[in-house]
């Protein structure tokens, strides 16, 4: 399903945690804003930057799909909100 007219913006932020213990974890924050719906935001952290990005994009994609299908309309603790915590 293509809904290109519904996308207000997509933002992706990448970086590393810079841990003092020498452990370098990467993070990826993906935020998708659709017109008329709340922003779908996912934060992923992991040791492999490419895998972290892949997981983040996959999760936000499922979250947006759930929003478009009407999951959780008017509910704060809906299944798509629980997906965010997965």
Image: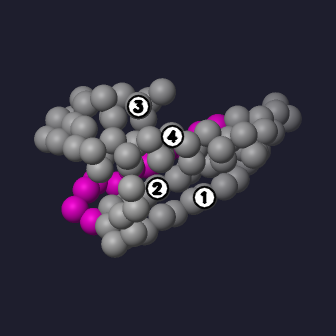
Query: Would you place residue 34 above or below residue 60 in this image?
Result: below
Q: CA distance from mark 2 to mark 4?
A: 11 Å
Asked which quadrant contains residue 44, the reply is: top right
Label 4, label 3: how far apart the Cα atoms are: 8 Å
> Does residue 42 belong to the magenta stretch?
yes
Q: Earlier in the sequence, mark 3 or mark 1?
A: 1
Quick one: SS at disc 2? strand
Q: Name the residue beneath numbered marker 4.
A: 59
Disc 2 crowd rating (10 Å Cα; few below 14, some 14-19, many 20+) is many
Which one is closest to the eye, mark 2 or mark 4?
A: 4
Q: Nearer the viewer, mark 1 or mark 4?
A: 4
- Quick check: marks 4 and 3 in contact, CB under 8 Å? yes
| Residue picked out by circle 1 | 13
**What residue appears at the point 57 percent right and 48 percent down from the top-left corner?**
57
- CA gap, disc 3 to disc 1? 20 Å
The residue stretch that appears in magenta:
35-45
Please, is residue 56 above or below residue 9 in the view? Answer: above
Q: Residues within 10 Å of mark 4 (few under 14, many from 20)?
A: many
Name the outermost residue toward the front: 1
Which residue is depicted at the point 24% across and 29% down? 77
Q: Is residue 32 left or right of residue 47?
A: left
Q: CA distance from mark 3 to mark 2?
A: 15 Å
Q: Nearer the viewer, residue 50 or 4?
A: 4
Can you give x and y, in whole percent of width and height, for residue 61 in the image? Answer: 47, 47
Q: Which residue is mark 2?
A: 31
Q: Are marks 3 and 2 in contact (CB under 8 Å)?
A: no
Which dot marks residue 83? Answer: 3
Mark 4 lies on a secondary structure that is helix
How far apart marks 1 and 4 lie (CA) works out to 15 Å
The quarter of the displayed image where residue 18 is located: top right
**Residue furthest right in the image:** 22
């Amino acid at each position: 399903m293509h809904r290109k007219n519904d996308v207000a913006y997509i933002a992706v932020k990448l970086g590393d945690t810079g841990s003092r213990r020498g452990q370098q974890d990467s993070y990826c924050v993906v935020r998708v804003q659709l017109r008329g719906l709340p922003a779908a935001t996912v934060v992923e952290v992991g040791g492999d930057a490419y895998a972290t990005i892949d997981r983040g994009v996959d999760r936000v994609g499922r979250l947006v799909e759930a929003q478009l299908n009407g999951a959780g309309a008017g509910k704060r603790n809906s299944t798509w909100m629980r997906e965010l915590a997965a």
